[in-house]
Amino acid sequence: MLSQQHTLSLSEYSSLYDLIVPQDNLLRKINDLIDLNFIYEELLSKYSPDQGRVAECPVKLFKYLLLKVIYTLSDVDVVEPSRYDMSFKYFLEMLPEQGVINPSTLTKFRRQRLKDTNLLDLLINKTVSIAVEKGIIRSNSIIVDATHTLSKSNLVSAIDVLRERSKPV
């Protein structure tokens, strides 16, 4: 079940963000200038409207994936700094004292909600185009991690090659 309603969370420690995260911080700029609410619309069909428990916010999960790409981190390595790195917490719109997700949630999000690789490409492309529009990204080239991208170059799996080569001649 997907809920688009953000609950207004108040914390006496929220003012720490203004003291710790500088105005020119990349994550602060992205968070302040880019509205990622289009992710709700893109992922609406991937969630059941009336079954199951309330899902983790897809915008937050997508932001975790963006952090993974920006800082070249694994699922575990991106969640751990979000416990104490105030720029990560600000970017993820978390309260300073708020706990973090389990790293396996990111894996489930990719496998269950972003099964369609074109959807992930669409979300990244939209985010990058908005960032270019707002002047956050000034480079003419973008490097994308293609680890989970399907390729036609290896038509035979490594195991099949080994099986074939291990056959007696």
Image: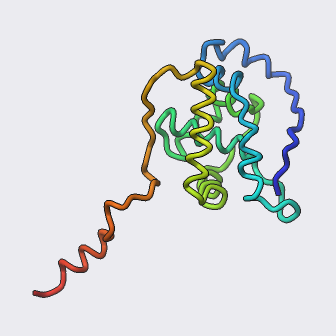
- Kindly indicate the quadrant of the structure image that contains residue 28: top right
Q: Position of residue 11 (x, y in %)?
A: 85, 26
Q: Is residue 10 left or right of residue 101?
A: right
Q: Write the residue at 74% across / 28% down.
A: 96
Which colour assignment does the render follow? rainbow
Q: Position of residue 167 (x, y in %)?
A: 18, 85
How many marks overall? 0
Q: Is residue 46 left or right of residue 73?
A: right
Q: Position of residue 103 (x, y in %)?
A: 61, 50
Q: Is residue 50 left or right of residue 156?
A: right
- Kindly indicate the quadrant of the structure image that contains residue 112: bottom right
Q: Position of residue 20 (x, y in %)?
A: 67, 15
Q: Write the residue at 58% across / 38% down.
A: 66
Toward the left, the furthest residue is 169
Q: Nearer the viewer, residue 70 or 116?
A: 116
Q: Quadrant of the N terminus?
A: bottom right
- Kindly indicate the quadrant of the structure image that contains residue 47: bottom right
The answer to whether residue 41 is above or below residue 35 is below
The answer to whether residue 92 is above or below residue 165 is above
The answer to whether residue 54 is above or below residue 80 is below
Q: Quadrant of the C terminus?
A: bottom left
Q: Write the residue at 88% across / 42% down.
A: 5
Q: Write the residue at 49% across / 33% down.
A: 71
The answer to whether residue 117 is above or below residue 135 is below
Q: Nearer the viewer, residue 81 or 90?
A: 90
Toward the bottom, the furthest residue is 168
Q: Nearer the viewer, residue 11 or 108?
A: 108
